[in-house]
Image (cartoon, helix red, strand yellow):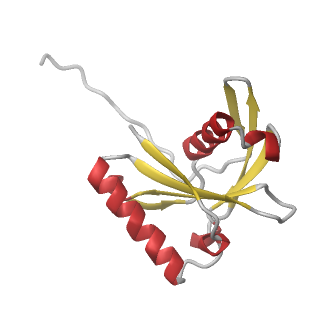
Amino acid sequence: MTKFVIPSRERGIFLDPETHVNLKITTTHHVLSAETQAAGVTVFGRTHDTAAHLHVRSFAPILGVPEDPVCGSAKASVAAYLAHTGVIREIGSDYMARQGMAIGRAGQVAVRVSGNDIRIGGSAITCIDSRLRIRSSNY
């Protein structure tokens, strides 16, 4: 599954889900996702607050997810982009990324980049707990 990673210079997209900028970004992600059959689109930008180095937003409308509150694969994609472009040197190889503020489900993820290895970590809560039973069949 493909995921687009788009850096952004507009800090407003991370703060208020009712802004025109947010509507523009959400619509753009939906169009990009539908036209390319990408599983998701992630936009990120640097922040100057003390809680995190980056703010991230992830959208997967083609999969029925308007916005993912906290997405580890998005953080890994952003880290790979930062490492590939060399921007990782500006923020450091160990950093915090925030996500979910715009939809009222804020979370933080710790990211560590070491060579080609990317590690994602943090605390989590269980939102859904279930079992899947697979019956044997002859196809």
Looking at the image, can residue 106 be seen?
A: yes
User: Relative to residue 104, is residue 64 depicted above or below?
Assistant: above
**Looking at the picture, how far across and down is residue 122, in whole percent?**
74, 44
The single residue placed furthest to the left in the displayed view is: 139
**Looking at the picture, how far across and down is residue 25, in whole percent?**
47, 69
Looking at the image, can residue 64 be seen?
A: no
Identified at 41% across, 61% down, the residue is 29
**Looking at the picture, how far across and down is residue 63, in whole percent?**
34, 52
Identified at 55% across, 77% down, the residue is 17
**Looking at the picture, how far across and down is residue 131, in whole percent?**
42, 37
**Quadrant location of the C terminus in the rendered image:** top left
Identified at 56% across, 46% down, the residue is 74
User: Relative to residue 96, is residue 27 depicted above or below?
Assistant: below
The single residue placed furthest to the front in the displayed view is: 85
| 112 on left or right of 22 | right
**Quadrant location of the N terminus in the rendered image:** top left
Number of numbered discs:
0
Identified at 45% across, 74% down, the residue is 24
Q: Quadrant of residue 138?
A: top left
| 119 on left or right of 13 | right
The single residue placed furthest to the top in the displayed view is: 138
User: Relative to residue 97, is residue 133 depicted above or below?
Assistant: above
The single residue placed furthest to the right in the displayed view is: 50
Camera-side residue of 138 and 73: 73
Camera-side residue of 112 and 69: 112
| 28 on left or right of 37 | right
